[in-house]
Structure formats: structure tokens, C-alpha cells
Image: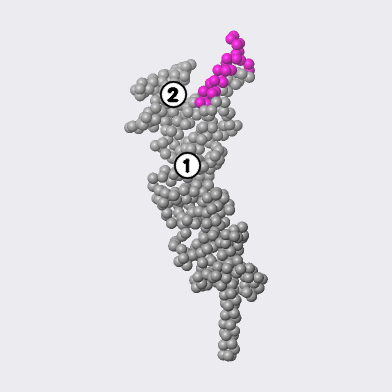
Amino acid sequence: MKKIVALGTMLSFVVGSVFAQKYDTYKNYALLNQFKKGKEEFDKKQSDEKFMSKPEAYILKNALYVGNALDSTQAAQAPGYINEAFTAFKKYLEMDPSASLIEKEETYKNGVLNLRWWLFNSGYQDYQNKAWAEGFPKFEKVFEVSNFLIAKKELPGPIDTNTVILAGVLAENSKNAEAAVKYYKILADLKLNDPSYEDVYRYLVRHYVGTKDNDNFEKYRTLGKEMYPQSEFFDYDKVDFAVGLEENWAAKIASLEEILAKDPNNYKANAIIGELIYDTLNPKKEGAVKPANADELEVKMVAHLSKAAELNPDRAAQNYIYMADHYMDKSERQSEIIREIKRKVKPGTKPTAEDAQKLKDLQVSYDKDYDLMKDYYEKAAIIFGKKSELDRTEQRQYKIIVGNLAQYYSVKREGAKGADLTKYIAEEKKWNDLDEKLK
């Protein structure tokens, strides 16, 4: 039995030596820089399963194909050679994870280094030419080769920074968000704070806003603020981005509603939805058409602004002003329609039954909205009145509110009688006196 084992060991050694000698024949072409001849001879053996059964066959192929790619006379064939070389390199590592031949053989090591060199330079040229889609796959390969070389101490670590940033930029411009995030996260997680990397953090923040990943949004917004404390960009919260990144009104509303579905007590989201709806119901543009679902939007606006006022009493006055302004504008539009209908009635005649009903309905609606205007202005006035100091904007708002309330009670006392008249006169005087005081 001992003799059989010894014989088997000897045969294995002999076979290994024979294969090594066979590979040496082709390796010598590389040593002599005869890559074209070496590839021609090597290609004849690629159909030989035994010859290709050893890891060395693939790292040898890498060296020979890369050598041909570097030959300026074969520039047209170079991309194809490099792709095959990279595949052979990957196959070699699969068969020999220790990569012992690369560590032992300078020829094989140079083949890997030159593989990276060609891919990097070709990909960088694509970057300069803004050929994003062509350059990105090359830098994906560079990234893999660089990681291998860093692990083998052939490149400084912990990462090949230039490769990672270029891979990210090419991925981003190729509209490959998933890949861009992969590479940018590598840089951000290392807390790199060179000014040129700020856009890396910005991209991640925008990306995670778009994907509604609040945990990663907060992580990279916080990291960005830590690395770039002077940048206002990282002061913006998810509500700011939800509004700023969407291009149309409906998308902004939907994005804010998604935030409120998870965080219903978010003051800013409630306030901004209310303000966005206010702008739609009370457009400044001449000839703007009222939304078909205006009544539904009004209910939503009031709900969100009221919620915002409840959540943040210190800023509630602004929310009440929006609602009061809305009902003032709405009542003024109704008042104008009432005047138009009345203008159509000839002197000495009565309005038609149809117009009479319209006037009645409009007056009811006007009175209701005009009273709501008063209610919200009074709430805002109470808040301003309790403040020890008002800024210039608040002073101006307070003055307008007081004037509007005095006008409200002036209108209400017309035709009033008894206790109502007395009440309205007293209220009108109170607000007029305050108006004079504020002057």
C-alpha cells in the first residue's frame, strides 16, 4: 500500500510538472513581450480541456490577452481582449482563491496590474467624453480588480478612491441609481470631507428622500451636516425635500401625505399642505379656474392648517391668517356675484324667481364665510395681542387683521337691531380704537 501511495504522489508530481512546463512555454512569450505570438499559440490550446483545467491556464490567458490589448497596432481588438482577460482573471480567482500564482509570478501580477490600468484609462476617457454608459461597466471591473490588488497590498487602501468616485459619477449619469448609491455610500461611510465630495452626500440624501427611506435619509443628512457644517443643504428636512423635489402640485401633496401617513403630527407637513391648497383655491394669476373639487380641498386645507395650529401654538397665528384670508377672498367673490345679479334687475322691478333664489343662497353662503373669516382673524389677533414683541411682518399682519375686524363689525351693524346692534357697535369701536393705537 505504501508503494502505491508513493507512486500516486509521484505521478501527481510528474503530471503537475508537465502542466507547469506546458504553461511555461506560453509564459515565456509574455516574458519576451511576444504577446501576439503567445496569444496565437495559446488560442490553439483553449479547446484542450486538460490544458484548461488548471487555474494557471486562466491567469496566463489574462496576461497574454492584456498584453495584446496594450499593443497599439491592435487597438480595435483591445476592448474584446480586455473583456476576455477580465473573465479569465475572475475564473482564475474562482479556481484559486488564494491567488498564489499572482503572488509568486511577476508576469501574472503585471497582467493584473495592466488589466486595471487599461480599464481605468479607457473608462476615464469615456468619462471625459461623457460617454457614461460606455465607461460605467469598465469602472465596475476596475473596482473589482482594485479591491483584489488592495487586499494583496499592491495598491494602498482602504479603497481605491478615484475608482469609486468615478464609478459613482458614471453610474449616476447613466441613470443607474442603484449602482450610484452603492459607490457613493462607500465614500460617505468613510466620512470623507473634501469639498469635492459634498455632492456625494447630497445625492444620497436626495435618493433616500425619493425612495422614502427615512432612516438612510436621516443618516446621510446627518453625516453631510457633520462633514460640511456650513452647507445649508443639510439643514433641510424631509418635508422640505418632499416639496422641493416634486415638479407639480399633485406630486407635492402626495409626497407630503406619505410623510403624514407615518408622522401625522409633523407640523411642517400639515402647514405646507394647507398653504399649497390655499394657493390653489386663491390663485393670484388672472383668469385662473377654480378646481372642480374646490369644496373638498377647502375641507382638507382647514383640517391641515387647524392641525398645524394645534401642534405649534407659537406659530398658530400664521395658520389662522391663511384660513381667514381664504374666507375673506371667498366671501368677496360671492359679494361680487351678488352685486352682478342685482345690477341686472331693472329699477322698479323684482328679480326673477331664479335670481331671487340665487341671491338668497349666495347671501347665506356669504354670511357663513364672512363669519368664518372673522373667527380666524380674531384667533390670530388674540395671539399677536399676547406677544410682548412683534417683528415687522407680524406688526404689519396685526394691523391688517385689526382693520379687517373693524370693517367686519361695521358691515354687520348695518340693518342690525337691539342687542345685536349694541354688540356690533361696541366691537367695531374696540377694533377701531386698537387700530388707532397700532398706528
From where the camera sits, is residue 392 visible? yes
Rendered location of residue 179, percent (x, y): 54, 54
- The answer to whether 181 appears left or right of 356 in the picture is left
Q: Tag 1, which secondary structure?
A: helix
Q: Residue at x 57, y 82 (%)?
A: 13
The residue carrying mark 1 is 240
Rendered location of residue 116, percent (x, y): 52, 61
Q: Vertical placement of 5 versus 382: above or below?
A: below
**Magenta part of the chain:** 329-353
Q: Residue at x 53, y 43 (%)?
A: 255
The type of residue carrying mark 2 is Asn
Query: Callout 1: 10 Å neighbours few (<14), some, many (20+)?
Result: some
The type of residue carrying mark 1 is Asp
Mark 1–mark 2 distance (CA, rounded to whole Å): 33 Å
Q: Is residue 46 magenta?
A: no
Query: Callout 2: 10 Å neighbours few (<14), some, many (20+)?
Result: many
The residue carrying mark 2 is 404
- Total marks in image: 2
Q: Nearer the viewer, residue 280 or 160?
A: 160
Closer to the eye: label 1 or 2: 1
